[in-house]
Amino acid sequence: MLNEKKLLMRLEKMLDDGINGTFEESDYDETQLSKLETKWLRYLTTSKLSSKKTEEERVKLKELVSDISHQTKTPLSNILLYSQLLSEQPLDEQSRQLVGEIRSQTEKLEFLIQSLVKTSRLETGTFSLTPKESDPCGMISAAIAQAKPKAEQKHIVISFVSGSCTARFDSKWTQEALFNIIDNAVKYSPENSGIEISVKAFELFTCISVEDQGVGIPEEELPRIFGRFYRGENVREQSGVGIGLYLSRQIIEGQGGYITAGSEPGSGSVFKIFLPR
């Protein structure tokens, strides 16, 4: 009975060391271990090696993502600059359209690379979210200001009904998530329409609602719209890469919140961000 208790205590100690990341094979003498303890020893040793390998791969991925971001930044900036200079030259209509298309596709590529970099950092844990309790109204106003230039080009009015509330969120990244949703609303809404944004506090969450008057989303597509690179059938002709909503969901869920979407085709959509309080 005493030996069994001692065995259980040794196994528990080995398991605790494995969970805490403090397990060292050198702490245990295999010649003195039972058959069961030996299996634990081999399992925990293998797990530690696997964990070490995973961490090494995470570091390599972080370096790769950083290199991609750095190496593509200058060429893309140069292409945008040269296309801008070219557009200022005397060109015929066809050449002007081609220059405009070069600029449009370059901007699309730049957005795609930056979105993938941000997504990779979040998924691999190389960039951590730091939620803090604060009033989200300032963050919402900043996201609206970011989307306003495109909205004004289409004569879309963005209205914001503020409320007195707080939530726990990372201001910078949550602004990014909200901007992606507002930007989508602007992109898929008709000219001279409106977008309504409101904030409301509930017991456990604070809800930020974005309601547009756009083309809407078919019911069968709603479960898939937050997937990476997913684009709905009725918006294929619109510019975009289909990663904005995916990134928004990663950001919000990474802070303990969630996003919902509701829509009726032809009657607009409502996206709701729920941030923990």
Image: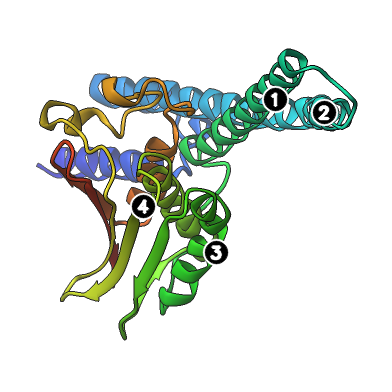
Give whichever of discs 1 and 3 has the lower sequence position: 1
- Cα–Cα span, label 1 and label 4: 35 Å
Q: Which residue is mark 4?
A: 252
- Cα–Cα span, label 4 and label 2: 40 Å
- Cα–Cα span, label 1 and label 2: 8 Å
Find numbered disc 4 in the image and state the secondary structure of the residue it sits on.
Answer: helix
- Cα–Cα span, label 1 and label 3: 25 Å
Q: Which residue is mark 2?
A: 87
Give whichever of discs 1 and 2 has the lower sequence position: 2
From where the camera sits, is residue 194 visible? yes
Where is residue 91 drawn, in percent x and y? 84, 20
Residue at the image position 45 percent from the left and 58 percent from the top: 174
- Cα–Cα span, label 3 and label 2: 28 Å
Give whichever of discs 4 and 3 has the lower sequence position: 3
**Mark 4: amino acid:** Ile
Q: Which residue is mark 3?
A: 145
Give whichever of discs 1 and 4 has the lower sequence position: 1
Residue at the image position 55 percent from the left and 60 percent from the top: 172
Q: Nearer the viewer, mark 1 or mark 4?
A: 1
- Tell me the tag on residue 100: 1
Q: Quadrant of the N terminus?
A: top left
Q: Quadrant of the C terminus?
A: bottom left
Give whichever of discs 3 and 2 has the lower sequence position: 2
